[in-house]
Amino acid sequence: MQFLFLFSLLSLVSAGSFSSVQPLCHDDESFALLQFKESLIINQSTSAYSKISSWMAQSSDCCTWDGIQCDQITGHVISLDLSNSSIYGSINSSSCLFQLVHLQKLNLSFNNFNHSEIPVGVGRLSKLTYLNLAYSGFSGEIPAEILQLSKLVSLLLYSNPLKLHKSGLKSIAEKLTNLEELVLSEVDISSTVPSILANLSSLTTIFLKDCGLHGEFPTGIFQLPNLKSLSVRFNPKLTGRVPEFNRSSPLEVLRLAGTSFSGKLPDSIGNLKSLYYLDVERCNFSGPIPSSFANLTKLTCLDLSENNFSRGTLSWVGKQTKLTTLRLAIISLYGDISFSSIGNLTKLTTLVLGENELTGPIPSWLTNLTQLNTLWLPYNKLCGPIPTSISSLLNLQILDLYSNNLSGSIEFDLFQKLNNLSYLDLSYNNLSLVIDPSTNSIFQKFKVLGLCSCNLSDFPEFLRNQDQLEILELSQNNIHGQIPKWISNMSTDTLLILSMSGNSLTGFDQTLNAFPWRSLQILYLSYNKLQGALPIPAPSIVYYSVSNNMLTGDISQMICELSSLTYLDVSYNHLSGFLPHCLGDLRNLSILNLQYNNFHGSIPQIFMEGCKLGMITLSQNRFEGPLPRSLANCTMLEVLAIGNNHIIDFFPSWLGILPELRVLILQSNGLYGFIGKPETISRFPKLQVIDVSNNHISGKLPSEYFQIWKSMQSFDAGHLKYMHANGQIQKFPSYGWSMPSYDYSMTLTNKGIKTEYSRIQDFFVAIDLSGNKFEGEIPKNLGNLKALHMLNLSNNILTGFIPSSLATLTNLESLDLSQNMLVGEIPQQLVELIFLAFLNVSHNNLTGPIPQEKQFLTFQNSSFDGNVELCGSPLSKRCANLEDPPTPPSNFEAKQGLEFPFEFGWKVVAMGYGCGFIIGVFVGQIIITRKSGWFIKFLAIGHPTRRRVKWRRR
C-alpha cells in the first residue's frame, strides 16, 4: 500500500498537479515579521512607498507580502527587501528580525536608522549571502559579528558614517572567502589595503571610494581573474601603479580619481577590451598617453583630467565612438580640435577639454555632436569668433569658454535659441557682447552666467527677470555709475556668487542697510568707486571683498552677525573709527585684511581661543597702543602684518609660540627693547619673512634666532607656488563650485622701493631689520640662512667687518648694509653671489678695493658712496699704489680650450636663472603698483580668474 501511495504521489507531481502550490509562511516567521513591523517607525513626510505598511492587508500569508520572498519548497523566509521604505529609528539586537534564521538576503538600504549602530544580532543570520545596508544612516563601528557570516557573497555598506577597525579589510579577506561584491565606499577604514585581498579570486566588484585608505595599493588586485569593477577613488593618500594587463582581463570599470597613483599608464591598457568606464582624474600619472587607448572601443566614459602627462595632441582619440563622456582637462594638450579626433564621437553628451593649450578656432563641425549637453573649453588659447552654428546644439546645458583668445562682436540673442542652456561663461576673452534690451523678458532662466570682460557698458536688462541665478559674474567691464534698484530683486533666494569687481560703480540707486540676496556666499565688489558706508551682506556670506574703493565711515556692528564669514577684505578704502569688539565672535574668520584705511585706537583683544585666522593684515592705519596678547590664540596664523601704525610695545618675542607663522611684518611702529635670546629652540619654527624695520629695537643682532630659523636655512623651488588660504563653500550648486583660494599678500621695502607683493612665493625668504639701533658685529652664523633672497641691515649702528660667511647665501638677490659703521674690505668671496641684483654698502667706513668680478661689475657708484677709503671701479678713485684691476676677459676670450663649452654654458644658464628669478619676484611687483588693467585681469586682483572655482561634474 505504501508503495502504491508513493507511486501515485510521484505521478501527480510529475503531471504538474502540485506545480502551482506553494507552502504557506511559517507562523513563527509571520509573527516575527509583524513584531518587527511594530518596532519600526514610518517617516510619513517622505514620498517613498513603504513596503511594510501593506503587510497583513494583502494576506495572512507573509510569503505574499511586499519585499518578502520564501523558499519554494520549505516556505521559510529567505529574502527580506525593505529598501527605500521610509523606515526611521533603530534596530536593537533583540529584534524579532533576527529570528528569521533562514534569511539569505537582507536589504535595508535607503532608509534612515538615525545614526544607530548596526545591531550585533545580524551575526545570527548565518545563512546570509547578501547584506545591503547602503544609505541607511547606520553609524559607529562595523560589528565583528558580520565577519561570522562566512557565506556572504555580497557585502554592501556604502554611504554610511561607519568605521571599520584597522585590521578590518584583512579580517574580511581571511573570513569572507566567498565574497564577490565588496562595497564599502565612504566607510572610514583608515588603513592600508592588505595584499591578501588579492587572494579572493571570486571578487567581481570592489568599491572603496573615500575610505581614508593609504599606503601602496597591491597590484595583484588589478589582476584578479574575475574582477570587473574596481573603484578606490578619492583616497588622496593611496599610492600605487597600474600594472600590465593581459588580454583575458574582464575589467569593465576602473576608477582611481583623486588618489596618488603615479607612473605611466601601461601600453597594455589597450588589452582591456571590455573596459567601458575609466576615470583617473587628479592622480599623478605621467609620461605619454598610451596610443593603445585607440583599442578601447567600448569606452563610454573616459576621464584623464588633471594629470602630469607629456604634452600631446588629441590624435589618439577618434575610435571610441561609443563615448558619451570625455574629460581631458589639464593634461597639457596642444594643437587644434580636429575633426579626426572628435568629429565622429556623435554620442558625446559631455566634452571637457579645459585648461590645456589648445589653439585655433572653435570648429563649426562641433554642431554635428547633437547630443552635447556640456561643452567645457576654458583656459585654452582658442581664437577667432564663436561660430553662430553653435545655436544648433539644442541639448546644450553648459557652455564654458572662459579665458581664451576669442574675439569679435557677438549677439547675445544667439544663445536664446538654446532653451536648455543654464550655464554660460564667456568671461575673459576679447569679445564684445551685444545685448538687445528688448529681449529682457524672453530669455531662458540661467543658473550660471559669466560675462566678465565682455565690454558691457550697462547692466543687461534681461537680468531683471532672472530669478534662478546662482552665479553671476560681471567683473572687468565698463559699467559706470550706480547699481540700479532692480538688481536687488534679482534671484534673491538663489544667488550664491556675485562678482562686479573692476568696473566704475559708485553705489546703489537706493539706500541699502543690507544686501538682499539671502543665500549669497561670495561677493566681489573690489576695484570700483563705491562711496558711502560699508554695505553689510546677508548672514550667509563666506567670502566678502570690497577692497580698492572709496568707502568711508566705520565698520557697523551688524558685520558681527555674519557667523559664516571666512574671508573679509576691505583694504584700500577710507574707512575709519574703532574696530568693533564683536569681531571676536566671527569664529570662522580665516582672512582679515583691513590695510590702507584710517582705523585708529588700540587693536582690541578680539582673537579668542580657537581662532582660525591664517592672515591678519592691519598695515597702514593709525592703530596705537600695544599688540593684543590674544594674538597668541591664533595658532593657525601664517601672515601677520601690522606695519606703519603707532604700535608702542616691547619687541613681541611671545609671537614665536605661533607654530605656523611664516610672515611677520611690523615695520614703522614704535617697537623697542631687545630681541634677546629665544626661550626654546622651537620659537618661530616656520618663519621665513620678518620685517621690523624703522622701529627702536636695540641690542645685538639676534644670532641665536639665526641658528634656529630652519625655514630660512633651506628651501625647494622646484614648483612655483604661492602662500594662500583655502576655504570651502558651504553650499554647492549641482555642477560643483568650490571656494576660491585667497593669496596672502604683504608690503616690503626692497632696493629702497616700497613694494607690494600681491602674492608671496612659497619659498621667498627675507629679513629686514633696518632703521633700528642694532649694534655690534654682524654674526657669522647669518651665513647659515642659505634660503635668504633679501637681507637689509641698513641704518643701524653695526660695527666690525662684513663677514665672508655671507658668501654662502647663494640665493641672495638683495643685500643692503648701508648707513652703519662697518670697517675693513668688502670680502672678495661675495663675488660668488651670482644672483645678487642689488647691493648697497654706502655710508660705512669700508676700505680697500671693490671686487671686480661677476655681479660686482653691474653695480653703480651709489652702491659704494660715503666710504672714502674704498677704491676701484665704479668709483673714480683709483686704488693706492695699484692700477685698477683689468676688466676680466669674457668667457669667450678666456676659455678657448676644451673646457670652454661647459664653462660658458653653465655661466649663461646661471645668469639667466638669476635674471628670470629677479623678474618674477621683484620686477613683477612694480607692475602691480601701476595697477595696469592687464595685470589686474591676469592675476585675478579683485576677481576670481586663475583662482576661479573649478567645475567638477560628478
Image (tube, rainbow, N blue to C red):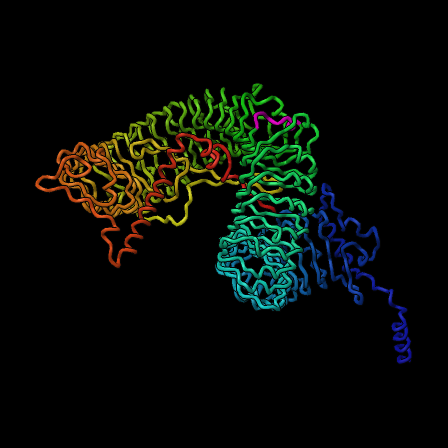
Which quadrant holds the N terminus?
Answer: bottom right
Out of 708 and 860, give the one closest to the viewer: 860
Quarter of the figure with residue 678 = top left
Q: Does 104 sit above or below residue 915?
A: below
Image-based side of 665 in relation to 261, left or right: left
Out of 951 and 90, give the one closest to the viewer: 951
Image-based side of 121 in relation to 857, left or right: right
- The reply to whether the magenta stretch includes residue 459 is yes
Image-based side of 640 in relation to 277, left or right: left
Residue 842 in view, yes or no:
yes
The residue lying at 31 percent from left, 40 percent from top is 766
- The reply to whether the magenta stretch includes residue 786 is no
Quarter of the figure with residue 603 = top left
Image-based side of 683 in relation to 31, left or right: left
> Residue 27's x, y, as percent?
79, 60
Q: How many marks?
A: 0
Q: Does 240 sit above or below residue 506?
A: below
> Residue 689's x, y, as percent?
33, 39
The residue lying at 49 percent from left, 54 percent from top is 310
> Residue 320's x, y, as percent?
64, 57
> Residue 394's x, y, as percent?
70, 41
**Which residues lie in the magenta part?**
456-464
